[in-house]
Image (cartoon, rainbow, N blue to C red):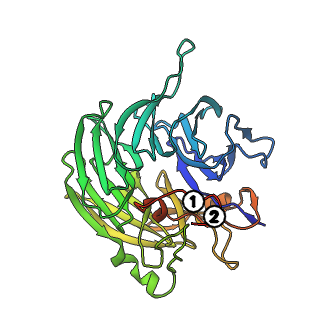
């Protein structure tokens, strides 16, 4: 038996850390102590979160003020929780499977991106005399929307990216008014990061192995960071292995540098990126120009599945162990120390002491290049392509 790995990690401005494992999640405080959980395998003193539909959770988000937390699972159930008492304040079924969610700056609406290429929004709370209606359509793409984020400052924009290599910047809430398109990626765009310290810019990551800095007002590509130049030695010395060409990881027998997630580190004026397969984090400072400068590769113990930022600390969730000799650690936390990033031993130990669920074997995470493939289709029911 092995411990289930963390599939998603999200943090809040109030110091909460959400750790998702399959259909359940723990909420910890900034010391790693569980304060609420959907799991039955926790102490009686921990607040039990109800209202959760027990299916695999695929995306989560906190509101900007940390007062709300939302989840969406594989059965298209969206649940919004009040983080003061962890009660469910809204639950709804959406029409299409979600890919990403985010709250608008006010926290009054939750934005939901889906595999149909649309972004809808729904109120986070309903008054007693209101009747729940279908989520409002905000905007549409012609392919899967991979991520959705809000800009900082005024005017307010909603940023979306898709499988057709595009970044779209739309005015909010009138998102039919397109401000700009960011064109330049050559593969699907997986992730967007915006930052309070850079309200006019955004950073995207893609299956093309690049991080790109954009001017969101004009859509101008400001800078491209080629990850192959940084990370190719990990293939040549065997620290990273190429995949196997099968349905779960198709066309994988090649060197790839797909970006899983980019986050901003507000207090340090930095961005951090996780790259599929790689036991590293890529850290970039935001400099004058604007420009991404002082690009660093920080080694960690295992490939990273997701990354989030808690104040100035980086919380990285590990992908499932690939061999019997691998550690079963769930996560690592890095903190800035004298201009370097070092392990926060105390918080890392607290997170790694948490119990998740027990599995017969660790299931490998599906590659982003499966759904990123433009010939994407759902796995056959008989497990044969």
The residue shown at (68%, 34%) is 51
Q: Residue 355 vs residue 203: left or right? A: right
* Residue assigned mark 2: 383
User: Residue 327 placed where, x, y %?
Assistant: 67, 73
User: Do we see residue 326 in this rendering?
Assistant: yes
Q: Quadrant of residue 351?
A: bottom right
Rate crowding at label 2 as few (under 14), some (14 to 19) or many (20 or more) other CA atoms within 10 Å: few
The residue shown at (30%, 51%) is 167
Q: Residue 34 vs residue 275: left or right? A: right
As drawn, the residue found furthest toward the top would be 129
User: Do we see residue 31 in this rendering?
Assistant: no
* Residue assigned mark 1: 379
As drawn, the residue found furthest toward the right would be 44
- The one nearer the camera, 10 or 320, is 320
User: Residue 352 placed where, x, y %?
Assistant: 67, 62
Give yes or no for contact between labels 1 and 2 (Cβ–Cβ under 8 Å). Answer: yes
Q: What is the quadrant of the C terminus in the image? A: bottom right
The residue shown at (74%, 66%) is 2
- The one nearer the camera, 99 or 290, is 99
């Amino acid at each position: 038996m092995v411990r289930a790995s963390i599939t998603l990690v999200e943090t809040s401005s109030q110091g909460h850390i959400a750790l998702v494992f399959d259909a359940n999640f723990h909420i910890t405080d900034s010391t790693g102590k569980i304060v609420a959980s959907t799991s039955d395998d926790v102490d009686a003193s921990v607040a039990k979160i109800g209202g959760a539909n027990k299916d695999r959770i695929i995306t989560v988000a906190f509101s900007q003020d940390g007062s709300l937390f939302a989840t969406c699972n594989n059965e298209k159930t969206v649940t919004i929780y009040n983080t003061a008492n962890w009660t469910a304040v809204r639950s709804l079924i959406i029409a299409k499977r979600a890919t990403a969610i985010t709250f608008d700056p006010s926290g009054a609406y939750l934005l939901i991106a889906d595999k149909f290429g649309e972004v809808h929004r729904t109120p986070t709370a309903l008054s007693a005399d209101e009747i729940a209606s279908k989520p409002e359509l905000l905007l549409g793409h012609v392919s899967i929307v991979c991520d959705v984020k809000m800009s900082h400052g005024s005017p307010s924009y909603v940023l979306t990216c898709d499988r057709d290599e595009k970044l779209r910047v739309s005015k909010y809430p009138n998102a039919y008014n397109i401000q700009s398109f960011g064109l330049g990626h050559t593969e699907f765009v997986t992730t967007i990061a915006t930052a309070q310290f850079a309200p006019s810019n955004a950073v995207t990551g893609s299956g093309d192995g690049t991080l790109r800095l954009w001017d969101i007002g004009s859509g101008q590509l400001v800078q491209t960071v080629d990850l192959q130049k940084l990370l190719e030695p990990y293939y040549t010395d065997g620290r990273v292995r190429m995949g196997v060409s099968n349905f779960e990881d198709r066309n994988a027998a090649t060197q790839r540098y797909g970006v899983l997630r980019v986050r901003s580190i507000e207090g340090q004026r930095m961005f951090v990126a996780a790259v599929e397969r790689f036991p590293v984090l890529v850290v970039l400072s935001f400099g004058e120009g604007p420009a991404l400068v002082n690009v660093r590769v920080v080694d960690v113990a295992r490939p990273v599945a997701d990354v989030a930022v808690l104040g100035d600390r980086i919380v990285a969730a590990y992908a499932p162990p690939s061999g019997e000799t691998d550690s079963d650690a769930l996560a690592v936390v890095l903190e800035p120390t004298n201009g370097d990033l070092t392990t926060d031993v105390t918080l890392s130990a607290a997170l790694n002491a948490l119990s998740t669920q027990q599995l017969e074997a660790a299931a490998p995470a599906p590659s982003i290049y499966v759904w990123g493939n433009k010939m994407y289709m759902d796995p056959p029911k008989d497990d044969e392509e």
